[in-house]
Image: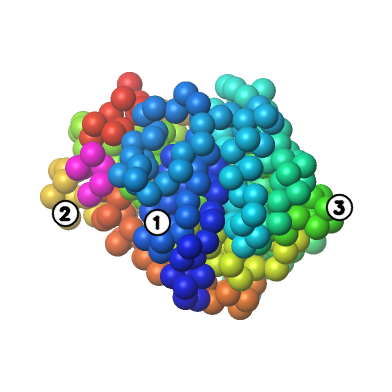
Amino acid sequence: MDLSSKLAERTVFVTGADGFVGSHLVDTLVEYDANVHVFVRATSSGELNNIRHHSENVTVHRGDLRDKHSVERALSALEGHSDSLIFHLAAQAHVGESWERPYETVDSNVVGTLNLLQSVVDLDLDIAKFDTAGTSEEYGNVRDEVRDHHDFVDDGRVLLSERSPVNPTSIYATSKLAADFLTMNYYDAYDVPTVTTRMFNNYGPRQNPRYITGTIISQALKRDHVELGNLTPKRDMCYVEDGVRGHLHVALGGNPGEQYVYGYGENISMQEWTDTILRVGTEEGYWGDPEIVQDEDRYRPGDSDVEELLVGHEKLTKETGWEPEVGWEEGIRRTIEWYAEHEHRWIGRVDWR
Ligand SMILES: C[C@H]1O[C@H](OP(=O)(O)OP(=O)(O)OC[C@H]2O[C@@H](n3cnc4c(=O)[nH]c(N)nc43)[C@H](O)[C@@H]2O)[C@@H](O)[C@@H](O)C1=O
């Protein structure tokens, strides 16, 4: 898909633009000369670093997704732009933290999404697409009573796709599933041209060091051991720039009212992911041979762990041509390089003692 010709001069509104995936999306939108509006928390300061380099190229709207008034005021910037796109990426996105801050998680993720959707209706905006970023966490674990409803590939792995039953196992995942359905409700009831993207794990530069990849790299760069929790769960790890291209392909080529699932297309256990990161960092000379220390305090309640999963992104690939382009080792190299060169951006936010 020729993103450049489809994005030039187009008005695009991004929530969560100062976050990890959002800031990479803004990079791409600015590169392709879109007219970018970003919605960020009124109190956001540190994270604005992620898009500070675009201060000349984007219009910043400050507010709070939980405050309908501020959402509506910001979205009014889209009035008269009938080809505009909305990317809703803002969320309280940390699974572990959703147990510590349950009300804030539901407020931000559910009420926040509702406020955006209802504002589009109240302002009578004539937009081209509204993309709500959902998550693979909505699948949770495979429950025995719905096992028969799952698809499997020949080697016995569970194939997770748009057809798969959901089973969210955390407050975060349940809040995102609610947001997904609210988004679809507004297509069914009001014809808002929505799409929902169910994305598997992203990793890359600027990711908060509290997620597994940053937790590993930040510790390996600073000390001789890496403290981690449960490393048996498997994840599909997708480099952030591939994730961002996926959102753009869905918004520009997907069908309104539909859902698109995507990820790298291979799973890896967190043990293997840790080993790979540590090996690549050793080979590149960033560290010696850090020891892995398992800390039971880091184990999470209800951690999702689909025993053997495979992400089926056939629908997105068939309809829009999207494919992941960055392999794990290359993505890991780029990520370590960013962490090594930007210690001041993450050192105050690490999740290790
Ligand atoms: C798609 C989905 O992707 C992400 O959710 P997540 O998979 O929970 O991400 P994570 O990097 O926090 O954990 C990955 C796995 O690694 C295990 N794990 C072990 N030891 C540590 C550890 O020390 N820290 C962390 N963070 N995880 C650890 C942890 O228990 C889990 O099994 C979010 O972006 C979320 O927003 C989202 O939507």
Callouts 2 and 1 close, C-beta under 8 Å: no
- Crowding near pointer 1: few (<14 within 10 Å), some, many (20+)? some
Dot 3 corresponds to which residue?
A: 189
Q: Taking 238 as reference, is 314 above or below it?
A: below
| Residue that protrudes farthest toward the front in the picture | 80
Disc 3/disc 1 C-alpha distance (Å) = 33 Å
Dot 2 corresponds to which residue?
A: 284
Q: Secondary structure at mark 2?
A: loop
Q: Quadrant of residue 178?
A: top right
Task: Report the span colored magenta.
Answer: 337-342
| Residue at figure coordinates x 23%, y 39% from the top left | 342
Disc 2/disc 3 C-alpha distance (Å) = 54 Å
Q: Earlier in the sequence, mark 2 or mark 3?
A: 3
Along the viewing direction, whichever of 181 and 36 lies nearer the viewer: 36
Provide residue 98's location: percent of width, then percent of height.
59, 29
| Residue at figure coordinates x 79%, y 50% from the top left | 186
Assign the magenta stretch its main secondary structure: helix
Ligand 1 closer than 8 Å to the CB at disc 1?
A: no
Dot 1 corresponds to which residue?
A: 30
Provide residue 278's location: percent of width, then percent of height.
27, 48
Q: Is residue 339 magenta?
A: yes
Amino acid type, mark 1: Val
| Residue at figure coordinates x 47%, y 47% from the top left | 22
Amino acid type, mark 3: Ala
Query: Is residue 79 shown left or right of residue 150?
Result: left
Q: Nearest to the eye among marks 2 and 3: give it.
A: 3
| Residue that protrudes farthest toward the right in the picture | 189
- Total of numbered circles in the picture? 3
Q: Earlier in the sequence, mark 3 or mark 1?
A: 1
Q: Nearest to the eye among marks 3 and 1: give it.
A: 1
